[in-house]
Image (cartoon, grey):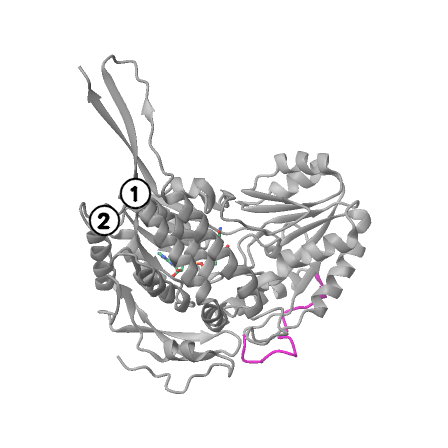
């Protein structure tokens, strides 16, 4: 298959190895090698900061899914190298994978910017170190997965449990953190001894493909990690439906998550879902204004608001509402908007034209209903490339809970801010959402903060900080934000089965 990207529309600073990767033929990573897609179909890969095509990726079809699942099943066969490998040796490979991600940081950062619209500095200082830490954490778990001996009530009987890998897992990830979302899922599955078919989002196929190659270089046997770039409706659904897939781990929209859970139920597949959010961020009057204004701004503007846990519903205690909003407005206006490859850039574009229209639609809808844009709005920021999918950081006030912008996930740099009066009221309003992914509390009164933290229906509550994640700390949702947890020991559990073995000793 020949590439139409002979002259690449990428920034000058793009590394030579990245240019070479982009101009290669669009392929899939199956059974330890790059192969042409049987489907013959492709995906145009766009730079969201320019709207220009920078590469062409393969779009896996049903036959490609079948091929990848067969490779993964072979890798899981009794006696295959991956099944025979000791747990500490699995850990060593994951550790080597971490070192390779580290060694290729600059290259991975370019890939994250080019198809994901990320800010390169943020990729290097946040996404990549977190991904490495994640691999290291789960490398450590590999050799520590233990069963039990069980004291049953039947004499002369020994009962023990074995922890076994769940089998072949399909991991379907979104575009907002292509590297991190992939590594969050790959690392625990490898530690547990599973075989994987990773399906990156169609907008961001590049990082996942490169990860497949690096994991293989680290020593993974063939077929243990396969990467299928492709569309959700075709490759994604084929993976969910394939009888050779034992578990589906999904991160993405609540709408698609519900669909996946329903389809997987017909085969009683294991499913974990990390879905959307509309997380409340609650500022009390005793929190220093400069601290809460900075914290609330970072909570919504980081990654251009394209974060599932973004602090997108801001509640500020009445007495300090104007002060906090005024400082946030100054912060928003100071953010340098531009291409993520530029060193000065602090805020990049949204992922796609579709997302750009969606986010602007929420802003315009709120303004039509009487909201005030204290800063920002739906017009493209003047300083950014007019062809890119940029939205200025936007703060909307004079809103109420009937606004779509307050109820629904926007997934852009748009925060809706409302005043509140007391703790009971704010606990009730914060919980009044179908989502329950994260929440933030800003106050000097730690007793009050912890009381409110206990009242909130959210998988993660941040007190006087926001948005941190760590490989060791479970992360996931209450309510329609999903079930199961990424990270921590809880995540490892979701890739393991328990086998109970009885022996008659008489
Ligand atoms: P999406 O649900 O459209 O796509 C996510 C992934 O699912 C992509 O790989 C896509 O190709 C695939 N997909 C789409 N339709 C499918 C189908 N019918 N069957 C199987 N796979 C399918 O979501 P998105 O727009 O790419 O991502 C943004 C969403 O992800 C937001 O709602 C956000 O909150 C959520 N998210 C959640 C978390 C979390 O940890 N909870 C993290 C990041 C993003």
Note whether 46 is above or below 486 in the view shown.
below
Q: Find residue 135 and report its horizontal and vertical position in percent.
A: 43, 53
Residue 377 forms part of the magenta stretch: yes
**Label 2 to label 1, Cα distance in Å?**
9 Å
Q: Is residue 236 visible?
A: yes
User: Which residue is situated farthest in the bottom direction here?
Assistant: 7
Which image quarter holds the N terminus? bottom left
Residue range highlighted in magenta: 370-388
Residue 366 lies in what quarter of the image?
Answer: bottom right
Q: Find residue 426 and report its horizontal and vertical position in percent.
A: 69, 41
Q: Quadrant of ligand 1?
A: bottom left
Label 1 environment density (alpha carbons within 10 Å; few <14, some 14–19, many ≥20): many
- Please give the name of the residue rendered at 32% of the width and 49% of the height, measured from the top-left corner: 90
Q: Nearer the viewer, residue 273 or 15?
A: 15
Left of 241 or right of it: where is 199? Answer: right
Look at the magenta stretch and give its main secondary structure.
loop
Q: Find residue 216 and report its horizontal and vertical position in percent.
A: 31, 61
The residue singled out by tag 1 in the image is: 165
Residue 317 forms part of the magenta stretch: no
Q: Nearer the viewer, residue 94 or 485?
A: 94
- Please give the name of the residue rendered at 67% of the width and 36% of the height, measured from the top-left corner: 450
Which image quarter holds the C terminus? top left
- Please give the name of the residue rendered at 38% of the width and 79% of the height, measured from the top-left corner: 20
The residue singled out by tag 2 in the image is: 76
Left of 279 or right of it: where is 53? Answer: left
Q: Nearer the viewer, residue 240 or 75?
A: 75
Query: Earlier along the polypeptide chain: callout 2 or callout 1?
Result: 2
Label 2 environment density (alpha carbons within 10 Å; few <14, some 14–19, many ≥20): many
Q: Secondary structure at mark 2?
A: loop
Left of 175 or right of it: where is 235? Answer: left
Marks 1 and 2: in contact by CB < 8 Å?
yes
Whether the residue carrying mark 2 lies under 8 Å from ligand 1 is answered with no
């Amino acid at each position: 298959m020949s590439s139409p990207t002979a002259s690449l529309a990428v920034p000058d600073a793009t590394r030579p190895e990245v240019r070479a990767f982009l101009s290669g033929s669009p392929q899939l990573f199956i059974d330890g090698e790059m192969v042409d897609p049987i489907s013959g179909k492709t995906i145009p890969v766009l730079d969201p900061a320019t709207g220009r095509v920078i590469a062409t990726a393969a779009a896996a079809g049903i036959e490609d899914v079948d091929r990848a699942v067969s490779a993964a099943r072979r890798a899981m066969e009794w006696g295959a190298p991956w099944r025979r490998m000791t747990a500490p040796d699995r850990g060593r490979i994951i550790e080597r994978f971490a070192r390779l991600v580290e060694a290729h940081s600059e290259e991975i950062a370019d890939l994250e910017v080019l198809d994901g619209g990320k800010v390169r500095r943020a990729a290097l200082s946040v996404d990549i170190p977190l991904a490495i830490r994640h691999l290291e954490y789960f490398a450590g778990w590999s050799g520590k997965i233990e069963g039990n001996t069980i004291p049953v009530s039947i004499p002369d009987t020994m009962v023990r449990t074995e922890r076994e890998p769940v089998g072949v897992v399909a991991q379907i990830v979104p575009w907002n953190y292509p590297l991190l979302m992939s590594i969050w899922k790959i690392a625990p599955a490898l530690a547990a001894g599973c075989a994987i078919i990773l399906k990156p989002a169609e907008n961001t196929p590049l990082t996942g493909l490169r990860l497949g190659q690096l994991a293989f270089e680290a020593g993974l046997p063939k077929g243990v990690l396969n990467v299928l770039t492709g569309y959700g409706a075709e490759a994604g659904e084929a993976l969910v439906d394939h009888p050779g897939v034992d578990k589906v781990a999904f991160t993405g929209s609540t709408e698609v998550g519900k669909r996946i859970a329903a389809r997987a139920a017909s085969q009683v597949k294991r499913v974990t879902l990390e879905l959307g959010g509309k997380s409340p961020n609650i500022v009390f009057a005793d929190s220093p204004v400069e601290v809460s204004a900075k914290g609330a701004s970072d909570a919504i503007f980081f990654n251009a608001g394209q974060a599932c846990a973004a602090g997108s519903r801001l509640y500020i205690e009445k007495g300090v509402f104007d002060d906090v909003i005024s400082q946030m407005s100054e912060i928003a206006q100071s953010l340098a908007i531009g291409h993520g490859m530029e060193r000065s850039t602090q805020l990049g574009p949204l992922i796609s034209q579709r997302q750009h229209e969606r986010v602007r639609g929420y802003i315009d809808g709120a303004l039509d209903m009487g909201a005030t844009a204290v800063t920002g709005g739906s017009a493209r920021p003047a300083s950014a490339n007019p062809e890119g999918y940029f939205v200025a950081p936007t703060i909307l006030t004079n809103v109420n809970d009937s606004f779509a912008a307050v109820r629904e996930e926007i997934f852009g740099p748009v925060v809706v801010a409302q005043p509140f009066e007391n703790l009971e009221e704010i606990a009730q309003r914060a919980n009044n959402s179908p989502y329950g992914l994260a929440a933030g509390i800003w106050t000097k009164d730690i007793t009050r903060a912890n009381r409110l933290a206990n009242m909130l229906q959210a998988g993660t509550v941040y007190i006087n900080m926001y948005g941190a994640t760590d490989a060791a700390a479970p992360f996931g949702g209450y309510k329609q934000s999903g079930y199961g947890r990424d990270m921590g020991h809880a995540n490892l559990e979701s890739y393991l089965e328990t086998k109970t073995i009885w022996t008659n000793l008489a």
